Image (cartoon, rainbow, N blue to C red):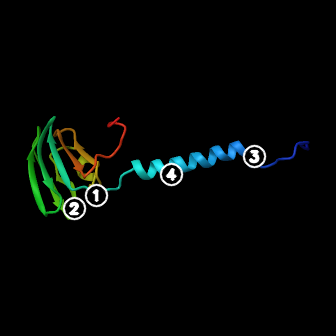
Amino acid sequence: MLSSSHSHKPAFRHLLAGDWLTIILSAIIITYLFQTLWSHEHAAKVQIRIGDKVHAAYDLNQQRDITVRGSIGDAVIHISQGKVRFAKSPCHNQYCVHQGWLTHNGQVAICLPNQISLELIGAQKPYDSLNY
């Protein structure tokens, strides 16, 4: 049996003061950016697009079903208590329906075969890589 002549010391014991400063500052910056850029703001409106054109925008503080004619048929969009979802769609896979309820500013649901999209809009546009 071979024995190692090196003792195993925890890696953090080899860190210098500058290393610790870098770790602490990085954690503070990451926490700050997460709090300021990641929005959990509830949306006020839903914007419905058909193809590349805005079809309509609706307030989320209502209870209603909206029927929208897309490229392959009618989709039903359900608005209830500050949230929205695709309730029915003529597309085959129903990914848009399975997306479920949208509640936060910046969330999007898309039915590609029917060319209909829902985007939630709040007071501020949330940051994401598409906004850059």
The residue positioned 17% from the left and 62% from the top of the image is 61
Contact check, label 1 and label 2, Cβ < 8 Å: yes
Q: Which residue is mark 3?
A: 11
Neighbours of disc 1 within 10 Å: few (<14), some (14-19), many (20+): some
**Nearest the camera: 1 or 130?**
130
The residue singled out by tag 4 in the image is 31
| Rendering coords of residue 38 (x, y %) | 39, 50
Rendered image quadrant of residue 114: top left
Q: Earlier in the sequence, mark 2 or mark 3?
A: 3
Q: Is residue 2 left or right of residue 108?
A: right
Residue ID for mark 1:
42
Number of the label disc, if any, that sits on residue 82: 2
Instruction: Name the residue type under label 2.
Output: Gly
Q: Residue at x 20, y 65 (%)?
A: 81
Cα distance in 3D space between marks 3 and 4: 24 Å
Q: Amino acid at mark 4?
A: Thr
Residue at disc 1, secondary structure = loop
Tell me if label 4 and label 1 are in contact, CB under 8 Å. no
Q: Secondary structure at mark 4?
A: helix
N-terminal-most mark, 1 or 2:
1
**Type of amino acid under label 3:** Ala
Please state the horizontal and vertical placement of residue 69, each as a whole percent of the image: 8, 44
